[in-house]
Amino acid sequence: MASYTQISLQDAEEILKLYGRSRVLKCTPLSLGISNSNYRVDLENEVVLLKISNDKNQEQLADEQAILVYLKERNYPYSLKPHPLKDGKFIYNYGQYFGVLYPFVQGIPPGPSDYTCQEVGRAIAELHSIKHDSQKLKTLRGHEAVGFGPIEILDYTISSSCPADFKAIFHQLFPDKLSGFNDAKFETGVIHGDLYYDNTLFDHNKISTVLDFEQAGIGEYILDLGISISGTCLEKGRIITPLVNSYLVGYESVRPLNTNELKFLDQAIILGLLSISLWRIKRFKERNLNPLMENSYQDLLVRAQNYFEMKKQEL
């Protein structure tokens, strides 16, 4: 998406002063982000990424930064830590604008491939392997505050606002209304919530950075895995088994799946598609953030049905 908010070099200079930085040489808009306008800002001695929030409120933005700070404290190697303002906070306010400042990271967005899948699988497994501080973990938001898990999806299907096609696909793919999945006990911790391959950067053919923690929170690892596979292991818009296998090679090199997770993995992948489909409904259909994307949720419903049929044929 193109940047929504246009700022001048002088605006960037004033914002960077809040961080104790000055001498802005260049401010370049970047075509990244749905919820933010992003700028590369070149200073004399460093390059930073300036984000202006277009969709989230300041509380949501602060909750996201709390997760990123926590991940750096727990030595997760792939996330970015926001730069603090001179007062130690992480959210700047400048006129009508507010947002965050990050280090600028060089890297290349990868394409879907066996190697990409393996690297993304390894990176999310490292996220799921963090040794958590149980007290600090309690201070972080739940994934349901910003995303949609099985309970939220099920509840949505009985709401009056649920589109008929979403409801029909859900009942076709989950005739038990997720009773088995919701009764199972899954390990929880910090999850990314949207780790498609295009939310990563690669450097020298290795994953260097995981981006876009807007839907991160405390949730079930199996849901995070399903979401990530559903948007990463793709060939011509379809999830294919060889790429899923490559993904799992990378994942299980760090964190082997337990018996329960293996049992419900296919359901988690379909739930991942429904989760992001519902996110698109809320964002583009109900809130009309981008009218051109109003029915984009249907692409994910088709992908879910295709995956379901493929797995039936493999039996």
Image: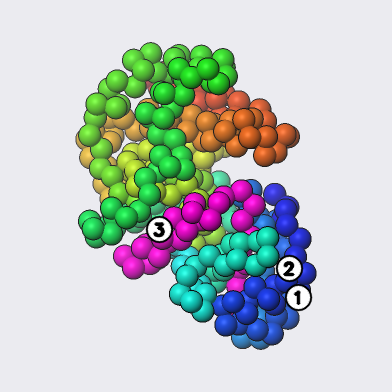
State the SS at label 3: helix
1 vs 3, front mark: 1
Residue under numbered circle 2: 28
Badge 1 element: helix
Report whether 90 appears left or right of 73. right
Q: Where does label 3 land, which residue?
A: 67
Magenta stretch holds residue 238: no
Compared with 301, 133 (above or below) is: below
Within the image, what quadrant is residue 12 found in?
bottom right
Which region shows up in magenta? 46-75
Task: Answer with the quarter of the image where residue 300 lies.
Answer: top right
User: Closer to the N terminus: mark 3 or mark 2?
Assistant: 2
**Mark 2 neighbour class, 10 Å CA radius: few under 14, some 14 to 19, many 20 or more:** some
Residue 307 is situated, as x and y percent measured from the top left of the image, at 48, 26
154 is higher (above) or lower (below) than 220: above
Residue at the spot of label 1: 10
Residue at horizontal 76 percent and vertical 60 percent from the top: 6
Report crowding for label 1: few under 14, some 14 to 19, many 20 or more residues within 10 A (C-alpha).
few
Q: Position of residue 280 (x, y in %)?
A: 58, 34
Residue 135 in sight? yes
| Distance CA(mark 3)–CA(mark 2) | 27 Å
Residue 299 in view, yes or no: no
